[in-house]
Structures are given as structure tokens and as C-alpha cells.
Amino acid sequence: MSRAVPKMQRADRPSAPGLQPRKPLTPSNPDVKLLISLARVDVESRWCLSKISASDHIGLLRAVRDFESMTVNEVVHGKQRSQDYPLHALVKDARERLVELGLDDRDIIHRLRITGERRLFGFLEANRFYVVWWDPKHEIVPSHKKHT
């Protein structure tokens, strides 16, 4: 006899533009260390990691080392270092690129703030952060605040 397996529920989509989706469910084991993966990295867009400067590369490696020493819970709920965005909040080029990559089947994208304007964008699944883009100029989800 087989048992029915309940379907996984996706994060609620906003019902109208501008509404924020609910915070995604905390992974099943938020006390495990975060792992950074390049398995889904975009190597052909303007936000490709290959376009990183040498000094930004050093800062990124230090930040990744720091993130991987933290639990998922510490990263997701700590000191404004991470945030989720609904896909509709991304600039048009980024949304179109997700379609090309086949990664538009999600409701949200996650970002890790490296320093100031510099961010990594990707998808958080369980304890893995799958890097998609390097955004050194804060272009993917532009801020309307000064100096961010």
C-alpha cells in the first residue's frame, strides 16, 4: 500500500502588485550551517560572477566563509544580511533572464548582502543558497534609499 504524500506548498503570491509575500517557511532544520552552491550560477548575464573585480572577489570569499560559519536561522533572521524579494520586484532584465534560465517557477528570490551595494542573488532551499547572480551595483532590485 502506498501512502499519499502531502504536496509542498509554495509561498503565497501577492494578490496585487506592491503587496509583500509572506516570509517563506523556515527550513526544516534551521540550525544547520548554510552552504553556498554554484550549481545554478548564471555564467552569461551581465551579473555573472566572472565579471567581479579582484578586490570584490576577496570580499566575496570572506563573506561566503562567514556565511558558511552561520546557521540558516542566523543568516535569515540576522542583522539585515539577507532578504527575500518577490520575483516581480526584480528589474525587467533579471525577470526575463530567470525565464531563460528556467528559474522563474518560484515566487521569491533571496539575496545575501556582501557589503554596501554588493549582493549575491539566488535561491535558498533547505540549508543551501544557490547563487545565481553577483550584483555589485545594486541593480537587480534597486533601492530608493540613499547610499544603499
Image (cartoon, rainbow, N blue to C red):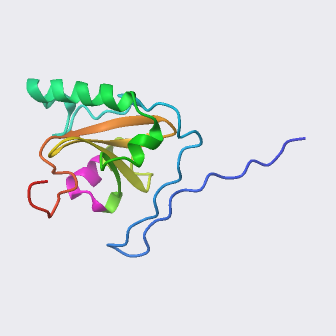
Tell me the residue at 15%/51% (across/down): 139
Tell me the residue at 53%/53% (across/down): 25
Tell me the residue at 67%/52% (across/down): 7
Tell me the residue at 58%/39% (across/down): 29
Q: Position of residue 129 (x, y in %)?
A: 40, 36
Q: Is the magenta stretch mostly helix, strand or loop?
A: helix
Question: Taking 15 as reference, is 9 above or below it?
Answer: above
Left or right position of 124 against 53: right
Q: Position of residue 74 (x, y in %)?
A: 42, 41
Q: In which quarter of the image is residue 21?
A: bottom left
**Count of labels shown?**
0
Left or right position of 130 against 134: right
Q: Does the magenta stretch include residue 78?
A: no
* Residue range highlighted in magenta: 89-97
Q: Does the magenta stretch include residue 91?
A: yes
Frontmost residue, 84 versus 16: 84
- Please state, as top left, top right, bottom left or bottom right, where the N terminus lies in the image: top right
